[in-house]
């Protein structure tokens, strides 16, 4: 497979989506999001009504709301940043591909499932997720700096009192 056939992983959300699709088989939460404020709604109709509402438009007064697009977004669990959710990746990948091995080498975390190629990352959860994708025979290129930056931002966020099962 040449480089043009590789999947480019440039964000935590993209990594989590690939894990949800290829490893855990998760059915994602589907929301509708406007292109300016990135506000999310449960239905497309609700989103379209909101962006036409003058009250809603006051939240971003400098936006040309006639140019707003509403798009569907699929939200997957945070496999790469939530240790409780990561465990489902370990369970599924171990059952399908063999024992998980994790080790640290020259400042990086390395992980592999069974006899599949190992993956490396600066964060152990990301390494495990990438190893699971390797085990599923996916070819990918990862923007490690951007992933690390996003993982650090998530880690710095105050807890919202959300249970680990969410």
Image (cartoon, rainbow, N blue to C red):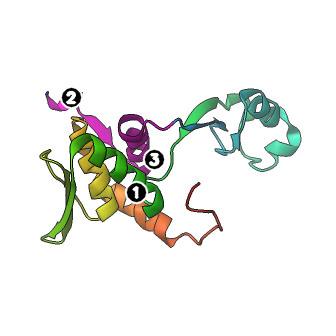
| Mark 3 or 1, nearer chain start | 3
Q: CA distance from mark 3 to mark 2?
A: 21 Å
| Mark 3 or 2, nearer chain start | 2
Disc 1 secondary structure class: helix
Q: Which mark is residue 13?
A: 3
Q: Provide the residue designation for mark 1.
A: 87
Cβ–Cβ under 8 Å for marks 3 and 1: no
Between residue 112 and residue 36, name the one nearer to us.
112
Q: CA distance from mark 2 to mark 1?
A: 32 Å
Name the spot of residue 125 as percent of width and height, x first: 34, 60
Q: Magenta stretch: give its range.
A: 2-26
Indicate which label's residue lies in the foreground, 3 or 2.
3
Between residue 94 and residue 89, name the one nearer to us.
94
Crowd class of label 2 (few under 14; some 14 to 19; many from 20; radius 10 Å): few
Crowd class of label 1 (few under 14; some 14 to 19; many from 20; radius 10 Å): some
Residue 2 image-quadrant placement: top left
Q: Report the residue at 28% width, 48% height from top.
A: 94
User: From what the image shows, is residue 71 above or below residue 87?
Assistant: above
Q: Provide the residue designation for mark 2.
A: 4
Prevalent SS, magenta region: helix
Cβ–Cβ under 8 Å for marks 2 and 1: no
Disc 3 secondary structure class: helix
Residue 142 in sight: no
Q: Report the residue at 82% width, 48% height from top.
A: 58
């Amino acid at each position: 497979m040449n480089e043009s056939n590789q999947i480019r992983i440039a964000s935590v959300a993209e990594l989590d989506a690939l894990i949800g699709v290829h490893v855990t088989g998760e059915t994602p939460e589907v929301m509708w999001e406007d292109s300016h404020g990135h506000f999310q709604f449960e239905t497309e109709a609700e989103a379209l009504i909101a962006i036409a509402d003058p009250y809603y438009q006051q939240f971003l007064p400098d936006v040309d709301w006639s140019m707003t697009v509403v798009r569907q977004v699929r939200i997957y669990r945070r496999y790469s940043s939530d240790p409780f959710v990561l465990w489902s990746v370990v369970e599924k990948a171990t059952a399908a591909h063999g024992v998980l091995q994790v080790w640290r080498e020259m400042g990086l975390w390395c992980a592999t499932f069974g006899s599949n190629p190992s993956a490396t990352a600066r964060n152990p959860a990301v390494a495990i997720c990438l190893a699971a994708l390797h085990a599923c025979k996916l070819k990918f290129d990862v923007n490690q700096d951007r992933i690390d930056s996003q993982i650090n931002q998530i880690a710095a966020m105050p807890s919202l009192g959300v249970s680990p099962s969410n």
